[in-house]
Amino acid sequence: MARRPGWSTGTTRCATASCCDRGPAVLILDAAATHRALAMPRLISALDEAFAAPAVVPPRHTHEIDGAGSIVSLIMPAWADGLYGVKVINIAPGNAERGLPGLHGVYALFDAATGMPLALLDADALTASRTAAASALAARYLARTDAARLLVVGAGRVARLLPAAMAAVRPICEVRIWSRTTASAERLSAEIRAAGLPAQAATDLEAAVREADIVSCATLSTTPLVRGAWLRPGSHLDLIGSFTPRMREADGACFRRGRVFVDTEEAAAKSGDILSALAEGCLTPDRILATLSQLAGDRKPGRGRDDEITVFKGVGTALEDLAAARLVFEACATHAPQESRA
């Protein structure tokens, strides 16, 4: 979220870091402050609880905005347990060529009873963190308990968070990064090593997939990157980059070979990966076995055998945003100095 005149950049101290600044009524956080308030283990647990609890999540609105370069704008509301939130996020696939992030947006949090605005958060940081956390939550239910080798396909904002997220739920001891741009994969590998996880760039995607226990794709690809023939028995394929019917990260064989799970029913209706696999006859609706809500609520089982291939397709949901925003707001409201509270 770009800084605007009069907007806080999050300089008032909270419990362990500079993360919040409240004016007369509204908590306002920039990207760095939002990210600092979202510790991955706590966020994964918060999502687990949110998916298991009642909530109202209307369908997202999607609009294609034509300008100098077309963008897709998503409007995503949700409310539960006294809070109402709405995210407006704009996705610009062409931004990589401009040296800009592919996502920009804001998240507004309100009191559901009074309509009072409570917080304005950076949606880019919120989205990246909750997306990585949702992948890790799915892996908690679907990846083998001894999964140790992680391949991340992509080198963007979400990809940067995936190793730490997966390491929070599985004993990750080896990370490989593949990107269409080798230099990007090498830079991200260096960042991950600096954070304490062994990582290296992968130049051969097929070989890297064949060796991985978890393959996590976080790209904006419109053509399949991962082939089902490459997946080893017992592996877990995580697809979280594509979110429109025209986007796709895996071929139909991935869905033919794997036991398929989704974050929400919306994934089955709007994901290019799912829709393409259905159209190609590689998947039937009855083979989509469970949503994250069903897994978190113990209404459906996850992984059954160590040798089976599991596939998780996530397109994101406003429920994840609300759970993350609640976590940020409650942490900052609790730890902010008294004089900074409304």
Image: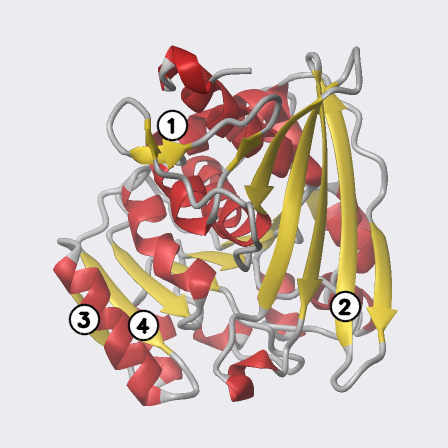
Q: Quadrant of the C terminus?
A: top right
Q: Earlier in the sequence, mark 3 or mark 1?
A: 1
Disc 3: CA contacts within 10 A as few (<14), some (14-19) or many (>=20): some
Q: Which residue corresponds to the image point at 42% horizontal and 21% vertical from the top-left?
A: 331
Q: Earlier in the sequence, mark 3 or mark 2?
A: 2
The residue at the far front in this view is 6
Q: Which residue corresponds to the image point at 31% horizontal and 54% vertical from the top-left?
A: 163
Disc 1: CA contacts within 10 A as few (<14), some (14-19) or many (>=20): some
In the picture, the disc for residue 42 is 1
Q: Quadrant of residue 98?
A: bottom right
> Which circle, 2 or 4, is nearer the viewer?
2
Q: Are marks 3 and 4 in contact (CB under 8 Å)?
A: no
Q: Secondary structure at mark 4?
A: strand
Cα distance between the residues tagged 3 and 1? 26 Å
Cα distance between the residues tagged 3 and 2? 32 Å
Q: Earlier in the sequence, mark 2 or mark 1?
A: 1
Circle 2 is placed at which residue position? 72
Q: Quadrant of residue 254?
A: bottom right
Circle 4 is placed at which residue position? 177
143 left or right of 282? left
Cα distance between the residues tagged 2 and 1? 30 Å
Q: Are marks 2 and 4 in contact (CB under 8 Å)?
A: no
Query: Mark 3 belongs to which amino acid?
Result: Ala
The answer to whether residue 163 of the structure is visible from this angle is: yes
Query: Mark 2 belongs to which amino acid?
Result: Val
Circle 3 is placed at which residue position? 190
**Considering depth in this image, is 86 or 203 the residue closer to the camera?**
86
The answer to whether residue 301 of the structure is visible from this angle is: no
